Amino acid sequence: MSISTKEMIIERQKANIVKRSSTSSEYDFTFDHPSLQIKRELVEQAVEALKKGETHYVDVPGVMALRKIIADTLQTTGLTSISAANVLVTTGIHESRFLAIQVFSALLGGIAVPSSCDPNVHQILKVRETRSLKTATNRKNFQTLPDEVLRAVQNGYKLVYFENPVRLSGKLLENGQFEEICSILERYDAYAIIDIGFLPWAEIPDHFYSALTNRIQRFVLIGETFPGIGMKGLNTAFITAKEDWVTLLQVQKQVLSICTSAPTQYASIMAGKLYAEKYSDLFETLKSQKNALLSALADARIAAIPGEAANVAAFFDPEEKIYRAFVESGIDLLPGNIFNAKGVTRISISLDDQKNKKIISFLSKFEKQEK
């Protein structure tokens, strides 16, 4: 395949990303993860897979080489008890959520979910009649409350769902909170699905990984593969679970005839290699960009919500006055009501310094207007 054809693939990929975006604005800050432009290496890997005839259905749990590199990446972060056999590859985080919630809520007779979380969670529960319970979240940062997990299991729910970090605020469970949730689950012989998609962008305390690793059989983990490496639009994600539960996921994936394309999976293998090389620099860049944004919010006297994940910042906006002012200036942010959280706005942090400066410039003008 010629270089010009590869360049055409890259351009079409960019166009597809725009079409799939929730907004067509040049200054779109509604995304979950920052992303570099699609890398030529990823396209070349996909093209090479096509040349080798990798156009047929792959193993339902995913290409073993990709499952292994996902497991290795998780092990590197501290989740030492996860192996390739515990990993199932999906066509994006929405499929990961759908399969995990549908399969395990049916297995365990229902699920408790936070009232404020990614909106797709509540949409999934409407697909078929699922016994469910909404649990309250911390009003200051929207994190799951151990007392609410206890309420759920005492009401007979054997499965709870939560995000760590939270996708609205980027907040991690504090010291002792996760350990308390683990103890509750053990005491009531219950399980949890944890969305750890934002985990790569937070400095995670060792206690979280040790508590998770020691009880990994009680947890199903979902997240995106290798965020920030230009995979946006190629859409691969993962679910990790104990091996017999991976088999249950595999059966459901077959029933629904959901196929994660072979070329995309081979491109993801290359993304995993790039991720290992570039992750540290990406993380440091995001932290620096977020700190600059938090300073600008403070200067504008806007109350930011504390959150450890470097890829998002949220602030209280009771009348959505600031949100509307941003939109009128051509800057798209994410209103909290999408997460069922009123009076909050989320800003995603870009890897594009010029785009971040656009927000900081706006905040400076907003501050002067308010004085």
Image: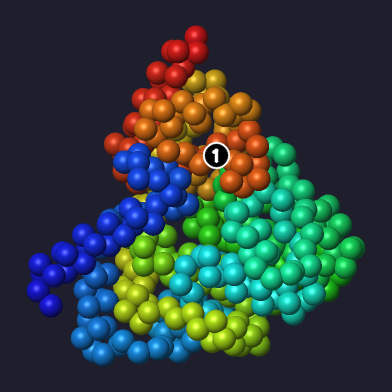
Residue visible at 65% across and 68% down in the picture: 127
Outermost residue on the right side: it is 154
Left or right, residue 309 beside residue 29: right
Residue visible at 10% across and 67% down in the picture: 4
User: Which amino acid, mark 1?
Assistant: Pro
Q: Can you give x and y, in whole percent of width and height, for residue 108 in the image?
A: 78, 76
Splitting the image into 4 quarters, where does residue 225 fall? bottom left
Outermost residue on the top side: it is 371
Left or right, residue 117 beside residue 44: right
In the displayed structure, would residue 231 be above or below residue 249? above
Relative depth, front residue between 141 and 10: 10
Q: Secondary structure at mark 1?
A: strand
Q: Can you give x and y, in whole percent of width and height, for residue 22 in the image?
A: 43, 49
Left or right, residue 186 beside residue 30: right
Q: Can you give x and y, in whole percent of width and height, for residue 216 in the image?
A: 67, 73
Q: Is residue 183 visible?
A: no
Q: Is residue 97 visible?
A: yes
Q: Can you give x and y, in whole percent of width and height, for residue 97 in the image?
A: 59, 67
Residue on which disc 1 sits:
335
Quadrant (top left/top right/bottom left/bottom right) for the N terminus: bottom left
In the displayed structure, would residue 250 be above or below residue 193? below
Left or right, residue 196 beside residue 182: left
Residue visible at 49% across and 57% down in the picture: 200
Total number of numbered labels? 1
Q: Residues within 10 Å of mark 1 (few under 14, many from 20)?
A: many
In the displayed structure, would residue 132 be above or below residue 48? above
Relative depth, front residue between 306 and 22: 22
Splitting the image into 4 quarters, where does residue 13 fall? bottom left
Residue visible at 23% across and 89% down in the picture: 52
In the displayed structure, would residue 349 be above or below residue 267? above
The type of colouring in the image is rainbow
